[in-house]
Image (tube, rainbow, N blue to C red):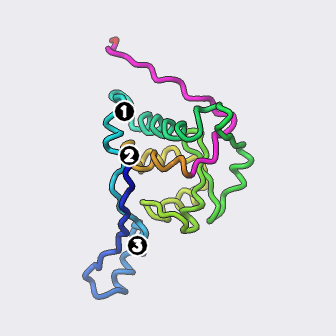
Amino acid sequence: MASARVVSVEPADSGKGGPDAANEDDNHSARSDDTVWEEAEGADEDDQIETTVGQSKKETLFRKLEDFVSQKFGKKGARTRPSVTMDTVAEHQSDEDFWCIIDGKVFDLGPFLRGEAKHPGGKSILTRQLSLGGQDADERFVRWHHPSGNTVRRAPEYFIGDLEGVAAPKALAKCCCSVS
């Protein structure tokens, strides 16, 4: 698997009169100064994955997420795959120690919040999730990530375990026709 090239994106000068004017504009935007741009990893591997035609973005994203987590930890329910209780997840809701739940999987966002790792969307997108008071990040994860992006490949590095009490995903039914 090829490694990604990460490039920091610096805020552009707004042309309105120097650095203070640019900073004033940045204070009013939702843009984060620590946003990074990176090249996609594993495009050749993505071409080898069976078709996802007919699946929603959410279904495709969650399926690929499960595939990459399973490669590292085994299938859901396997002895090699950790699980986490909701009570344990609830203990991790601070500005530097934040766990979130995506498709019944618990991920540690702490390294991004503490500056130990760079999140391509910047720290502010994660602090926004924290400020919303929700550790259930399904909707925002689907909104901001693409199934062929690097996120699903890197997610196992931050995987804590499956949330206990969440059933294993059912196999998606394949259909060749529609019935009216």
Query: How many C-alpha atoms fall within 10 Å of the one at disc 2: few (<14), some, or many (≥20)?
Result: some
Q: Quadrant of residue 169?
A: top right
Marks 3, 1: nearer the viewer: 1
Residue at 73%, 49% (x, y): give it.
88
Question: Disc 1 to disc 2, how far (Cα)?
Answer: 15 Å
Residue at 51%, 37% (x, y): give it.
66
Secondary structure under the numbered disc 2 in the rendered image: loop
Residue flagged by tag 1: what amino acid is it? Ile
Of all residues, the one furthest to the front in this rendering is 1
Question: Which one is nearer the viewer's eye here, 56 or 39?
Answer: 39
Marks 1, 2: nearer the viewer: 1
Which residue position is annotated with label 2? 146
Q: Is residue 134 above or below residue 169?
A: below
Instruction: Using residue 92 as the reference point, say whether residue 2 is left or right of it.
Output: left
Q: How far across and how far down the image is residue 100, in percent?
A: 59, 50
Instruction: Using residue 132 as the reference point, say whether residue 176 is left or right of it.
Output: left
Asked if the residue at tag 3 contacts the one at tag 2, i.e. Cβ–Cβ closer than 8 Å, the answer is no
- The overriding secondary structure of the stretch rendered in magenta is loop
Which residue position is annotated with label 3? 28
* The C terminus: image quadrant: top left
Residue at 46%, 34% (x, y): give it.
63
Earlier in the chain: of badge 1 and badge 2, it is 1
Q: Looking at the rendered structure, which numbered label has been put on residue 49?
A: 1
Secondary structure under the numbered disc 1 in the rendered image: loop
Residue flagged by tag 2: what amino acid is it? His
Residue flagged by tag 3: what amino acid is it? His
Q: Is residue 68 above or below residue 90?
A: above
Which region is colored magenta? Answer: 158-178
Residue at 63%, 47% (x, y): give it.
160
Question: Disc 3 to disc 1, how far (Cα)?
Answer: 42 Å
